[in-house]
Image: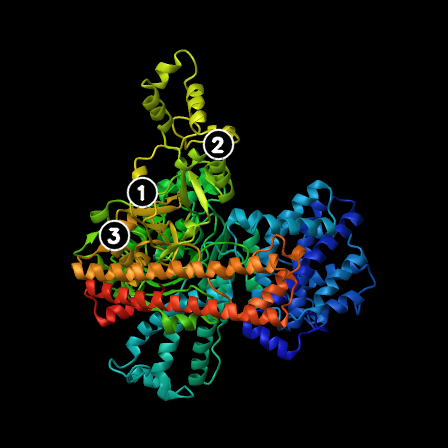
Amino acid sequence: LGADNLLCGRTLALLGESGQIEKQITRELYADYKRWRVQLITALAHANDLPPGALITPAQKLLDRILFVAFAQQRGLLPADTLKSVHKGDGWMILPLYDHYKALFRAIDTGLPSRQIPPYNGGLFAPDAVLDKLIVPNAACDIFMEFGKYDFGGEVSVNVLGHIFEQSITDLEQLKALADTGAFTLEAVSQQAEQARATSSVSGARKAHGIVYTPEFITTFILDQTLVKTIVSRRDSCMKSYQIESVSEGEVAWRKATAEEKKYAKTLLQPERVVELLFWRDWLTELTSIKVCDPACGSGAFLVAAFDVLLAEYTLVNDQITAITGSMEVFNADKEILNCNLFGVDLNAESIEITKLSLWLKTAKHGKPLESLEANLRVGNSLVSSADGGLEFDAAAFDWSAAFPDIVARGGFDVIVGNPPYVRQERISALKPYLEKRYACYDGAVDLYAYFFELGIRLLRHVDAQGNKGGRIGYVSSGTFFKTGSGAKLRAYLLAHAQMEAVVDFGDLQVFEGVTTYPVIITLRRSGAPDAAQAIQFLSLKDELPAKLLETFKDTAGLMPQGQLGLASWRLEDSRVADLRLKLQSGHKTLKNVYGTPYRGLLTGLNEAFVLDGATKDRLMLEDGRSASLLKPFLRGENLKKWRVEAHNEHLLLIKNGSTRLGFEAQHGQTLHQAAGSESVEALAWQWFSAQQPAVARWLKNFEPQARKRSDQGEFWWELRACAYYDKFDLPKIWYPDLSQGSKFSFDALGYCAGNTVYFIADAPMWTTALLNSKLIWFYLSGICDAMRGGEWRLRLFTENMERIPLPEATEAQSNQLSARAQTAQTAAEQRRDEIARFGHAALRDLVSGGLCNLTAAKGAKLPATWQTEVPEFGEFTAELKKRFKRELSLQERNDWDAFVVQARAKVAALTQTITQAEREIDACVYQLFDLSVDEIRLIEKRPA
């Protein structure tokens, strides 16, 4: 994306529309930036006879200086082509190239009027003994010219640079580690980077400090919901003393001017607006008092975004005052914002320097020195106070009162924003004793981000100057605390001290590159007495990120009262939905009341020994017919579907705990211990078992070492663990998996056994299967079960939630109707399954043994997974045949298979229609059982089933 190789206009527009242009520029610039850094370090090492590790920091500072120059020369802060002029020596003394650059650095620091370079100082270009002594060969200086190829005046925004600066934190640490190995080359660095990407999404300092650069659409949203709202409310409060009480919404009727004010008005360009002028000047003073802080500012994304919001407001004020007075007000908006409005703290010193540079690049103007940011941007651990013993736990402990005394004295900040560090609790063990003493939300298993919520609330003003509610927080953070036990104290703390205003749940959508966080945006206000009835705006995203998050939120956000959250796990849903769920569970018996606690499938501890495929089962039975007494058809969670099971012809060796001992005693009339005497009880037991089940014993002997190591075993290593409900597997039952994508309940009267990812309700009638497979019950479960990765429709069906399912009283006629519809649906589902399987078997059999395909290509091939649930259209069928088996059908073959496919698809379609109709009738009957209104039914019908 160099100046001589820009994207064409149309491509640029398309990329901009899709949100990809910034990512592409970032990737390309950083690839160059990273390569140049390694080349510079290598060149410096050779020229100065120093190890690469000693030159990483100086090289980085040199590149930062050159980056600023490249940025400044294209933004009018320095003469155009400054880099080229210095590099060529135009008007400079004939010296080694690096001496030219050192002269440039001094000029930028102190100013050089003869070269039209004003003093910018600010620290970046201050004298540096290390840099000044370096020998930088001309070839290395050639690298500096490469920066001039990029369009820092347009394409390369401060936001793009923020991504690059953030990545530098990790890269510098990796370079230092590589330098220590003595293998510092461009190839080695590239290889290291590839390995880092393959093994860890976030590493080094970024991982230790939880540094993740926040996308612009996130900062925009949070600033709108916090700083913008604060500005609007404070402006409106300020305006009250200057306007008439009753005015139309969106209009301002200014009060009449006093006699004194009228005298002053004579000096104005628009004297009739004197009262309005007084308001704008009063508001300007108030605006400078709004304090915004990011307590973990990272690369400065939020502070840069906050600057833009504040600058827009200052500009509005200035424009209004200028229009009324006829002259520009003498105030420097940039200076006011940097000195009065913005504050930040970060544990990582490099992050603070990056934030400073970002804000300098944002505010640099020709001829104006850069603002010193030392007072407002501080290095330290925000969470640990040096004023209460924190230094014992962290040398970087931070004293908020000492750093910002005026703000703390007046009650705190008005707005706290940020992206709290993503650091796992295992990495903060050293801080836990301190956190436990100082934070009400402490839990040993909660991650670091949680403490920033409590810290943020503490730092906020409780009541603002006009007596309004306290300051606002806006964080993008992990949302795992909504449901986890470790997040319970944080949930309680927030409900007690904050008024929730807006929540965006991104679900499984990942908004941060290189890190998995399950993020949410939360905005809230500090409040001593939160109103449980006040509505929270919420948006739950499932499928994709909206192109414009803020607009989508304003158009589609739902409402729910804060009191609906409660102390248990939080769920974001419309209050009508929550009320309906309460209605469903009121006045009815529960599944536990009627059928007891659901049972779990068996845990073998060694499935490869105890779960047999069809071929092994057949072989054991052929070797010894008695093997059949121990073999039971077996199901896994993946075999369970709605209305049916799709077994994989697996069988369980059901050798019950204690069965060897009981069998021996029944046969011999004495215990194993009595019979064994001084010999081994186990040896005697195995001898007896082998005689009763020789084929099974020979099979299990292959797994003896692994079987002995199981914790899940019976009295002997060949037995399964104890189970108090073996007999329940023989009863009619309703199966369901522990993790379910939609309803997957099915009735079983065949006596299957199952693994530990399967649960069942014993001795339950067919009509209960109908109830469980209804839309209403899935709607109910979706509100009480945890949603897993993959969306709201994928639920973890924990027993404590299944037990709560409401079971309404049904008349005999109603239960008979439900039973009949369930039987219809299950029979049709099983026939549909068999028809699809018949098609698949026929296709494989005839295609291979019938000679319709290349045998070599067909060997080991499998039919597409989609053909296990549907019969494909003929076009798809022939395409897959060509792709998988390298064979095209002849005309006769096409006719035969076309007819076969059409017939199979017709049968499957008819059975599908039968199932759909039965389910409609089941849903209607269940709605009637729960006495639902049309509106309540509509709420259920529009949710995923």
The answer to whether residue 360 of the structure is visible from this angle is: yes
Q: Disc 1 designates what residue? A: 730
Describe the element under mark 2 as helix, strand or loop: helix
Q: Disc 2 designates what residue? A: 695
Q: Nearer the viewer, residue 77 or 727?
A: 727
Residue type of the residue flagged with mark 2: Ala
Task: Name the front one of labels 1 and 2.
Answer: 2
Q: Disc 3 designates what residue? A: 765
Q: Is residue 377 left or right of residue 29?
A: left
Q: Residues within 10 Å of mark 2 (few under 14, many from 20)?
A: some
Location of residue 806 (image quadrant): bottom left
Which is more N-terminal, label 3 or label 1?
Answer: 1
Q: Nearer the viewer, residue 534 or 415?
A: 534
Describe the element under mark 1 as helix, strand or loop: helix
Q: Residue furthest right?
A: 94
Describe the element under mark 3 as helix, strand or loop: loop
Which is more N-terminal, label 2 or label 1?
Answer: 2
The image shows residue 185, relative to residue 559, as above or below, that is above
Q: Residues within 10 Å of mark 3 (few under 14, many from 20)?
A: some
The image shows residue 652, relative to residue 280, as above or below, that is above
Task: Name the front one of labels 3 and 2.
Answer: 2
Q: Is residue 54 left or right of residue 412?
A: right
Q: Residues within 10 Å of mark 1 (few under 14, many from 20)?
A: some
The image shows residue 177, relative to residue 688, as above or below, that is below
